[in-house]
Image (spheres, helix red, strand yellow):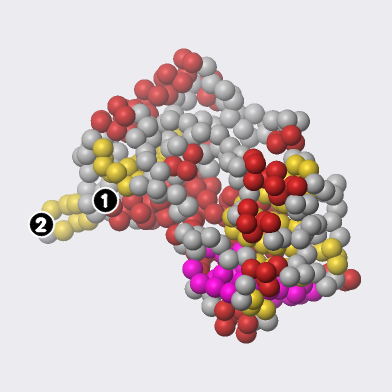
Amino acid sequence: MVKIAVLAEQSGEDRVALSLDNIKKFKNLGCELQIQSGAGKGSFFSDKAYEEAGVKVCPSLKDTLDGADIVLAVNRPSEDIVATMKKGVILACVMEPFDNRPGLDKIAAAGITAFAMEFMPRISRAQSMDVLSSQSNLAGYKAVIDAAGQFKRAIPMMMTAAGTVPPAKAFIMGVGVAGLQAIATAKRLGAIVSATDVRPATKEQVESLGGSFVAVENEEFKQAETAGGYAKQMSEDYQKQQAGLVASHIAKQDIVITTALIPGRDAPILVSEEMVRAMPDGAIIVDLAAERGGNCALTEKDKIVEKHGVTIMGLTNLAGKLPVNASSLYSRNLYAFVETMIFAEENKLAIDWEDELISGTLLTHEGKVVHERLTGNGS
């Protein structure tokens, strides 16, 4: 029987890697589940609820890891926790390998087989395992809700006997998963929504959600996407034209949400200090790239600051601020991935090391860091 251990997260993280609604699925694979006491507290999953669902609740980290074949977590465990894990155990979580290479080397040296869930290939069969999408979707929603909470005006247009309240204007920069959800949420709240992205295909997506698309739509823009759906590098002339258009547009916006975030790299600056100065007093910027320096030049990580009359929100882990939903989605992502490793009929591990899901997420194995993006053999 495959034994799965679920860790409690460190302080400040309310999500958990096993939600109550996914326990039955793991059990149907023949897995034995054990979870560290208190792990689900932040997501309102009590120890009692886990026990009633057939999960063994363990009083200590040592007991939780005892005999485990697979360890599940939200974030990479601390080095102290790694030191208690047995050689050969499988660890699946969000690893953020570019941020702490020495720590990753220690995981490899400990003989742990570690998988980075955020490295999941963007292919159709992996959609149910895509943690970046599931968590970004919630972050996009929460960004708009947080902006509305800080905004000192109403968002929808209101017709009253005393006069009309005009609708707020919201501008979404970056039309990925988070951006699309932000557009949809802002539209539901009654804002006039616009969005920009360097990929031509996103124009139709924005307009399908009721937003207007902002871009210099010349011939270069129409050819700005590769066959694989990625953005091409734009010419200096195009970048200058686009920057001018965006700057004039931002000056009229009440709420701006930026979403340009690339794992392992500093976030690109999309909103300069000059752009902030030009915005209306009382405007809001929510920077979803704050963890990597921010898309706004004035963003401060994990802080809400006011600069030039504009409130700039640099809070991180917005998905984690919706822990019930975030944990449930993340747990489903983990289940879909773990399912590929288990031969249920014989209740044993059966990992296909050639599977692109495995090779695409495998960071450490047999004492070495093996992923091409970390060994210098990949991009």
Side of 231 relative to 23 (left or right): left
In which quadrant of the rendered image does the C terminus lie?
A: top right
Q: Is residue 331 magenta?
A: no
Front label number (2 vs 1) = 1
Q: Which residues are magenta?
A: 15-42
- Secondary structure beneath dot 1 equals loop
Residue 225's place in the image compared with 194, above or below, is above
Location of residue 80 in the rendering, given as x and y in whole percent from the top left corner? 62, 57
Q: Residue at coordinates 46% horizontally, 15% vertically from top-left?
A: 237
Residue 31 in magenta stretch: yes
Question: Viewed as shown, does residue 370 lie left or right of 22?
Answer: right
Q: Position of residue 357 (x, y in %)?
A: 76, 49
Identified at 69% across, 61% down, the residue is 84
Image quadrant holding the N terminus, namely bottom right
Kindly indicate the quadrant of the structure image that contains residue 230: top right
Height in image: 230 above or below 328?
above
Label number found at residue 52 = none
How far apart in space, not on screen, are marks 2 and 1 (Cα)? 22 Å
Residue 92 placement, left or right of 29: left
Q: Which residue position holds label 2? A: 162
Q: Position of residue 108 (x, y in %)?
A: 74, 47
Q: Which residue is mark 1?
A: 151
Element on which disc 2 rests: loop
**Residue 253 position within the rendered picture, expressed as x and y whole percent measured from the top left:** 30, 38
